[in-house]
Amino acid sequence: MPPADVLVYTRTAGYRHDSLPDGAAALAALAAARGLTAETTEDPAAFSGAGLAGRALVVLLSTTGTVLTPGGRTALEAYLRGGGSLLAVHAAANAEPDWPFYGELLGTRFAGHPPLQPGAVLVEDPAHPACAPLPPRWEWTDEWYEYTSHPRVPGARVLLRADETAYEGGTLGDDHPLAWCRSVDRGRFLFTALGHAPEAYRDPVFRAHLDGALAWLLG
């Protein structure tokens, strides 16, 4: 039996979000609407040359800490450089803290967040599929991620920013990226910092953001 088109990985070695089942279900449903099969796993053995061969997309869904073996890291890097696609959602910013390649992909690392609270998302790149269905200013409740360094680095295409005037505790000012993407050799990578709460994955606007991310990654 061939592997599913989309591999959703939810292994955690640090904080574990209670939104993981909702997120995995939402991604499976979005994949199915595009005619793709999806499987969710926490087994690091899925990350091998054979395990990733033929996958249309790999998702790191709020993975935290070291969740890949050394061989799994090698396989994922080769998959991505060879034309694969990787979506990193929310706490995946805090995954694989000592893997340099993943740090280069993100362009930064997770540094913390103020308390969960309402705020606003600003669309920076309305032409991108992950942004096209969104309002220019989107009222939203989430953990407004902070980073160890500014994520707007060469090669990164910033998609969404936080409006720091709409919540308490932001430190980046007017330019606070929340989602960005980049090409990696023949592959594609997209990160969104949003998606903390279970109910987020039932919200039509957030689901449209994820669906647009899939459209770009699969394109």
Image (spheres, rainbow, N blue to C red):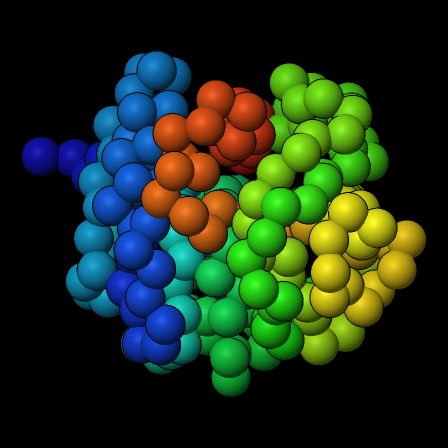
Residue reaching furthest bottom?
A: 98
Q: Position of residue 174 (x, y in %)?
A: 90, 53
Residue name at image x 55 percent, y 24 percent: 205
Q: Residue 70: image x %, image y %?
A: 35, 79
Location of residue 125 by image quarter: top right
Closest to the observer, 17 or 12? 17
Quadrant where the C terminus lies?
top right
- Judge whether 92 appears above or below 179 on screen: below
Q: Residue at x 71, y 77 (%)?
A: 148
Please state the horizontal and vertical placement of residue 32, each as a whole percent of the image: 29, 20
Q: Residue furthest left?
A: 1
Q: Residue at x 38, y 38 (%)?
A: 199
Question: For this view, does 1 lie left or right of residue 126?
Answer: left
In this rendered view, identify the residue nearer to me: 32 or 144.
144
For the residue pair 93 and 58, the one nearer the viewer reads as: 93
Q: Quadrant of residue 115?
A: bottom right
Outermost residue toward the right?
A: 174
Residue at 63 percent of width and 67 percent of height: 114
Q: Quadrant of the N terminus?
A: top left
Q: Is residue 39 above or below residue 61?
A: above
- Asked if residue 49 lies left or right of residue 91, the reply is left
Q: Classify residue 29 by image quadrant.
A: top left
Can residue 56 be seen here? The reply is no
Measuring from the top left, give residue 214's x and y in whole percent.
Answer: 50, 30
